[in-house]
Each structure stands twice: as structure tokens, then as C-alpha cells.
Image (spheres, rainbow, N blue to C red):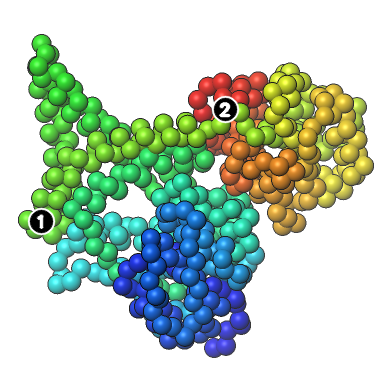
Amino acid sequence: MRISRVGYAVVVPGTGGSSLGTLLSALEHGSGPAPDEVVVVDDRPSGAPLPASALPVRVVRPAASGPAAARNAGWRAARSDWIVFLDEDVRPPADWRQRLVADLTALPERVAGSRGHLVVSPPTGGRRATEHERRTVEHASGWVGSDIAYRRGVLAALDGFDERLFRAEADFALRVRQAGFAVERGSRTTLQPLRPSGFFASVTEQRTHAEDALLRRKFGSAWRDLAGIGPSPLGRHAFTTAAALAAAGLSRTRLRRVATVAGAAWLALTADLALRRILPGPRTRDEVARMTVTSALIPSAAVFSRLCGEISALRAEPATPGAVLFDRDDTLIVDEPYLSDAKLVRPVPGAEQVLRRLRDAGVPIGVVSNQSGVARGLITEQQLAEVNARVEQLLGPFDTWQVCVHGESDGCACRKPKPGLVRQAARALGVRPRDCVVIGDIGSDVAAARAAGATGILVPTGRTRAEEIRSAPYVAKDLREAVGLAMGERAW
């Protein structure tokens, strides 16, 4: 079967192990079109010579540490239309190149990425899998980046991976979906060997709870469901930790009986956690010891990490936003479907006051608005300009207007919930999208903010759906409260 040429680069985000030579050899000797280049991101303190390869291999150094920074350094150095991220220790089979190109060639423009099927090596000797091995299999079915390809244009449009996160791949996949794109499973398979783990690996993994606060702020309280991660065990861990603290703190007071009950609760919860981790596994002496000790440490480690994450997220929020961007209809002015008569413009209550407050504080303001009535022939561009001029006459000048006049089927990059309008407004104001706050009345306003990396605040109206309210990261009862929230009057 002949496959048309698709340009792709392979990025290996981080090296230092002994398996890079095996990966390069597998890529070199596979069937199908070869990659345009292999970009190896060397994040070691001192680099060493790379294994010999007939492929064009290039080494880049990341500007910061961490897996997300390595991925960003790799794709930004590459110039192919498609960027394929492969972890150093994966093993692509002989037909991987052929199947990859077939996967990418078949994708329509709305699809931003292709995921490979990761096959995890089973335990040797027919024994049961350890907890670490079971978790490796579980992670292989999620948004891991061991074999995933993205269009370079999408990576650039979304500013790549969030370098603050360990789960940057899941975060990026959510932003891709919220920008209106899809990621599909390909036909290719890749072998994911079992990686060794230390005795306390399950304890150090609890550091991911630190970033839950940031992910909740970015995607709302339903972010775990959106990412397919499942419910958080933090509630149970918090109860276990509280029981331990109560038992220790009250043991030398008159409330010894309460301390005894709290200690029994801690012991029961810890034993239950240990048993749920031990019973599915091989139950060897080493595995039982590891599960017993770490089950006593995991709850407090998870709670401590989450507290640190909440504090860091609060500190990361600027006192005032770089800019505040508003939806127009039903946010600044009363909605009139396909408004074409400037005489019908009516500001919503409080709009003039909150805009004056932002101007007095020196905060740039703008409008980001979908106006598909132009594409549908229901209003003219001249009428749209007259309506917008009337809005400024009643509410004062805005620092930027970004309006999408396309229809839903036009496939533009600016129509909300895509991030184009927000990014264009940020660029016009000379600020970063992540420093912007977008205020609107429906889910597409919040989704556009998320996709651009900005903060979205929902001000519900009669047409706001219940699911949009539930999934919004921040909800305000009116425009005044929304602007107060943007200005840091209370915690996010």
C-alpha cells in the first residue's frame, strides 16, 4: 500500500537513560516514511554524545526543567507539520512509521492530534501485577504523552504545554477539546516497558494533588470528569489525616477517649487502604511491606500537597488582571437577536459603573463578540459598526473590539468557543492571554477563555444552561460581582 507523504518530526522530551539508542534504532529501521528529523531534548546537567543513527537527529536544551518544558523545547525547535512525542523508553514496532503516517493522513482538519495504543509489558513468570505495574497500565489508557502526535499549528495556537503541571499532557488535551478540536486514537501500537519504581514512589506521586487547585481554576470543578481521571480520593485522605492529628493531639488531654476513637478510625482507614492495594497484587513480602508503610504515609502526603497547591495558586493570581474582556450581548447590553438598529441598544444595569471602575484603575478593557448575523445575511457590517458605535457612545470607549462575523459552519479560528478572539484582543492590548479575564453569559465565553489560557467568569442569564453554570470555574451573580472577582476582591 502506497502512503502519501506526511511531514512529521519525532520529539524525545528528555534523555539520560540507556534506552535512547534502542529507540533511535527502532525508528531508523522501521518500514514507512521516515521522520523529517528526531529532536532529542537533553535536560541533563551535562550532555553526553548521542548514539549513532542514520536519521537526522538534533539535540536541543530546554530553558527550564520538567517534562512539560522539555516537550515545549522540542516542538518549538521542530518545523514539521506534525510533532510526534515519544518517550525515550518506548519501543515502536517495525510497522510503526507506516501506521503513523496512515493515521495522520486520514485525519480531517478538525482533528488536532492522534494517540497511539500503548501496550504495557506483562509481568514475567505469570505472577500478579504489583500496584506500580497496575498503575502503569491504567496510565497507558489515559492522556499520557508516550506516543501522541499533534499538529504544530495547534501547539503554537495554544502556547504548548503548561510548564507548571506534571499532568501537562491531560491539561493540553482539555484545552485542545475546548478550542473545538478533537484527538483520535490511531491504529499504531507502541510497547511501553514497565519502569522501575522506588519504595516510596506512591508517596511522592501524591505531589500531583498540588496542581489540582490550578486545574480546577482553569477548567472548573468538573475537570476530573472532562479529563477522564475519575473521582479524587482527597476527601478520604483528609478524613484519615484529621483522625491521625486528633489522636496525637488529644492523647494527653482530658479527651483521651476521643483520641482513642480517632486513633481507631485512623487505623481502620489505613488498614483498609493497605488491603485494597495488597489484595490484587502478588502479595510478596516486599510488596506487602511497601503497601503497608506507604498506606500510612499517603493520606498526609496528599493533604499536604493539596494545601501547598492551594496556597501557590492563590499567590500566582495577579492582584489586578492584565485586561478584562467582555462578551457584548446579554453581558454589556440587553440581548436583541441579530441587533441591527443602534436605537435599540440598552446597557445592562451596572455596566457603565463597572467599566468606569476598570478605566479608573488603568485596566485595559475590550469586547470579544460573535456576530454570525453578518454571515447569515441578517445584518450588514455597516449596521454592526453602527451598533458597536452606539455601545461606545453609551458606555465609553473600549481599548479593543474583536468581532467574529463568521457562521458556525465556516470553520474559522476566531468564533467562540475557539480562542481566536481572546488571543487577538490580548495581542492588540500587548498583554498575555493568561493575564486576561473574560466575562460572559454562556459556556462558549468561558470555553474560549480556557482555550486561550485566560480566566473565564460566567454571569448567568435566562439563556444560560444549567450544565454551563456547573462547569464554569467562576460564577458571579451580576456584572459588578464579576468585575470585583476579576479585581481580586475575594479569592478565586
SS category of the residue bearing label 1: helix
Residue 355 visible to the viewer: no
Q: Horizontal and vertical percent for residue 279?
A: 14, 52
Above or below, 362 relative to 196: above
Q: Badge 1 is on which residue?
A: 286
Residue farthest to the left, as pictured: 285
Numbered disc in front, either 1 or 2: 2
Identity, as a three-letter code, of the amino acid under mark 1: Asp
Q: Horizontal and vertical percent for residue 172?
A: 51, 53
Asked if residue 166 lies left or right of residue 36, the reply is left
- How many discs appear? 2
Q: Residue at x 91, y 35 (%)?
A: 386
The span from disc 1 to disc 2 (Cα, nearest Å) is 50 Å
Q: Horizontal and vertical percent for residue 314?
A: 47, 31
Q: Residue at x 72, y 32 (%)?
A: 364
Q: Residue at x 59, y 53 (%)?
A: 159
Q: Horizontal and vertical percent for residue 378?
A: 86, 44
Displayed quadrant of residue 18 = bottom left
